Image (spheres, rainbow, N blue to C red):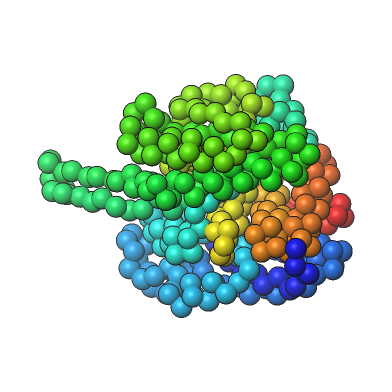
Amino acid sequence: MAATRALNLAVIGGDGTGPEVVAEGLKVLAAVAKKEGFDYKLQPFDVSGDRYLAAGGDPSKPSIPVISEEEIAQLRRYDALYLGAVGHPKIAPGILEKGLLLRLRFELDQYINLRPVRLYPGVPTPLADRKPEDIDFIVVRENTEGIYTGMGGFQYKGTPQEVSTQINCTTRFGAERCIRYAFEFARSRAKATGGAKGKRLTLVHKTNVLTFAGDTWFRAFNDVAKEYADVQTDYNHVDACCMWFVKNPDYYDVVVTDNIFGDIITDLAAVIQGGLGVAAGGNINPAGVSMFEPMGGSAPKYTGQNVINPIAAIAALAMLLRETGKNQGVETWAKAGRRIEQAILATTPKMKSQNAGKMGHSTTHVGDLVVAAL
Ligand code: IPM
Ligand code: MN
């Protein structure tokens, strides 16, 4: 591991409550950097739905870039990106998603979407009689292929004969690099937990119907598995996986899946871990620039009220430090990330609820509690 160096962070606060929760994450970063003894530099980027509209963007169809080529080129120079939320009630679905989030995933080749599913102590789960030790797994979702590529189109649009196709673009290369990442992740999880976790990797797909794309995934999975005799493997169809996440969440350890299935099962998983107020995600290019975000969205109706839960944003920052430290070989950052994670575990039991306005604390006070717990 390299000696520590200054962490160069690009920050996109974004829309709605994004900037508020990001501010709490940055408060925690300031405190942990001091304690662990590393420097950092922040560069805010003004990218949002608000900016799109202010620049004359059409709210009903994409008309101007949400983020410019030049801004993307600049973002490539940072160690990591920290994103609050981009989403605007006045802007039609798809414009900001495609124009920013998916664009960055593709351009920066963030081919992994990492979604830890952990029930923090004191957080209510809708599953009866489940405790933190029962819900602690991680979903590794492919993030640049499948039906997200935008391949396909319309024929005879607007007529009774309208045809639309949306192609599930699956490559052996894309599936295999994601699967390999998941096996490596399982292995490092085993190392980090002294063998308590990281023992099993479950592939989720739909091989009984998607006999082409599913077959590519299934064969790639079994081929790569031969190199990881220390990791047990299992396979679930995606529909069955949805039942078992609810019925037997304790069975899951590391899960790997394609883009759309990963999108769907991680929202189910977010609910069992206590909701979007605590769920964080990482868009990862292990050899490039990764982006970390809370999953809760811009929550426009709570904007500026100091009531939104910042735990997900703080957990996203912890993941940013851990994964960036791991991928760039800077142990101080990884250690700081683990330290924040511990502080979160000490904070959630002091909160009445994880829902906006019902936490028993303001947004800024939850940030203070995490800092105090460091
Ligand atoms: C996610 C989100 C995105 C996705 C949307 C906003 C495009 O739901 O990160 O899970 O579908 O990937
Ligand atoms: Mn999603």
The answer to whether residue 352 is above or below residue 113 is above
Q: Position of residue 290 (x, y in %)?
A: 58, 61
Specify the quadrant of the image occupied by residue 3: bottom right
287 or 69: nearer the viewer: 287
111 or 48: nearer the viewer: 111
In-image side of 68 versus 373 (left or right): left
Whether residue 176 is visible here, answered yes or no, is yes
89 or 276: nearer the viewer: 276
Q: Position of residue 94 (x, y in %)?
A: 38, 54
The answer to whether residue 170 is above or below residue 39 is above
In-image side of 310 versus 179 (left or right): right
Residue at 75 percent across and 36 percent down: it is 195
Q: Position of residue 255 (x, y in %)?
A: 57, 37
Residue at 29 percent across and 46 percent down: it is 167
Whether residue 20 is visible here, answered yes or no, is no
In-image side of 369 versus 211 (left or right): right
Q: Position of residue 107 (x, y in %)?
A: 44, 64
Location of the N terminus (image quadrant): bottom right
Specify the quadrant of the image occupied by residue 14: bottom right
Residue at 74 percent across and 57 percent down: it is 334
